[in-house]
Amino acid sequence: MELKRSLLDQAAGKDIITDEQADQLWTFLSEQQQQTPSFRFTHILYYFGGLIAIGAMSLFMTLSWESLGGWGLLLIALIYAGAGLWLTEFFLKRLNLKIPAEITATFVVVLTPLAVFGFQAGMGWWSGGHEYRDYHRYIDWSWLFMELATLASGAVMLWRYRLPFLVMPVAVTLWYMSMDLAPFLFGEEYVAWELRKWVSLWFGLLIALLAFWVDIRNQSSRDFAFWLYIFGVTAFWSGLSLMESESEWSKLLYCMVNIGMIFTGAILGRRVFVVFGGLGVAGYLGYLAHEVFENSLLFPIALTLIGLAIVWLGILWQRHEQPVSDRLRRLLPTPLRELIERRHY
């Protein structure tokens, strides 16, 4: 439900609340919203600037940095991490600004691979054939120590600060690990694209289940599962969609899985399921229109009727949503019921 100031003014005009209460309530809600990420100019500046700083120490590292040597890279990483920790404490304790604190704390975690790479290179332990700037470009099992250290760093920072954006580098690192572990475990077989698709599918499913577990366990208003859902669903859907099959039944099953994702997203209040599920269903219908029923006059008519039937189903649901929802929620396990109530009410 989106609450605007005009709605409070209308409520005051109908004597539901007083004008003074409307002012106080709007002030309270505005103060709360300042600490919740949203599409406002201030927050855009926060994340835009933060992502530039994070990218500078990860995606956009240049070859000239490698000339500093392993110990030089480690020193730079430690100095930057110290500054990031100081800023995190400053933003939280002095200014009470959680979003900038989230960004600077995440910046510290993102520096972990650079610090580990510098330490390995300085000790002469780096045996990989790549430079640090290749970390985000190439799949290689040699990155595993950097990834494990990043997960540990992320876990410590999450334990210390409880800031949701810290889950982002953890989710990215888990994704990287899934790709780097596969050639380590399967060797040359991983070169085959078919295996890569299965790795992406199962990894995505596991991360999505992890996100659901985090969602169930989370009792605060902060969203710690968001980034896990993003990367989990993306990996799962990509692996599923890239698989090839000549069987019409398997293609129908693909469509049903995507429909299931749409319903899952609606139940859990997670748009990422709905977006990817909608893309999958649209892809399947496009396949039917251009391949199976290419010369059929009835297919567009039947599809139109199905679409209108779904719209009518939505109308019926809206009319009876509350009693039906109440009955269905009573059938669910308590943790899932509480999660749905937190997401929708």
Image (cartoon, helix red, strand yellow):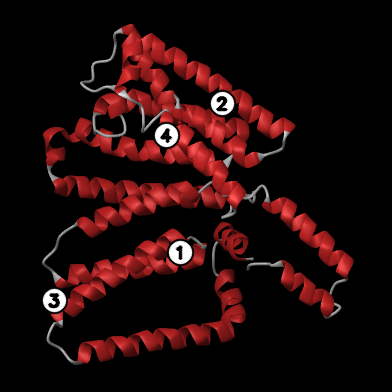
> Which quarter shows the N terminus?
bottom right
Residue 3: percent from the left, percent from the top?
68, 67
Q: Is residue 218 visible?
A: no
Q: Residue at left 44%, top 31%? A: 151
**Where is mark 3, residue-wise?**
291
Residue closest to the eye, 285 or 145 = 285
Residue 163 vs residue 141: left or right? right
- Residue type beneath disc 1: Gly
| Callout 2–callout 4 Cβ contact below 8 Å | no
Residue closest to the eye, 51 or 275 = 51
Going from the N terminus, do you reach mark 3 or mark 2 first?
2
Q: Residue at left 31%, top 27%? A: 133
Residue 266: percent from the left, percent from the top?
48, 68
Distance in Å between CA atoms under marks 4 and 1: 30 Å
Going from the N terminus, do you reach mark 2 or mark 4 first?
4
Distance in Å between CA atoms under marks 3 and 1: 29 Å
Q: Residue at left 55%, top 60%? A: 336
Label 2 packing within 10 angstroms: few (<14), some (14-19), many (20+) = many
Residue 313: percent from the left, percent from the top?
46, 85
Residue closest to the eye, 329 or 236 = 236
**Where is mark 4, residue-wise?**
55
Identify the element where label 3 is drawn.
helix
Residue 212 vs residue 29: left or right? left
- Residue type beneath disc 2: Gly
| Front label number (4 vs 1) | 4
- Residue type beneath disc 3: Glu
Tell me the quarter of the picture where residue 17 sits. Answer: bottom right
| Front label number (2 vs 4) | 4
**Where is mark 1, residue-wise?**
265
| Front label number (3 vs 2) | 2
Look at the picture and state if 70 lies above or below 243. above
**Where is mark 2, residue-wise?**
84
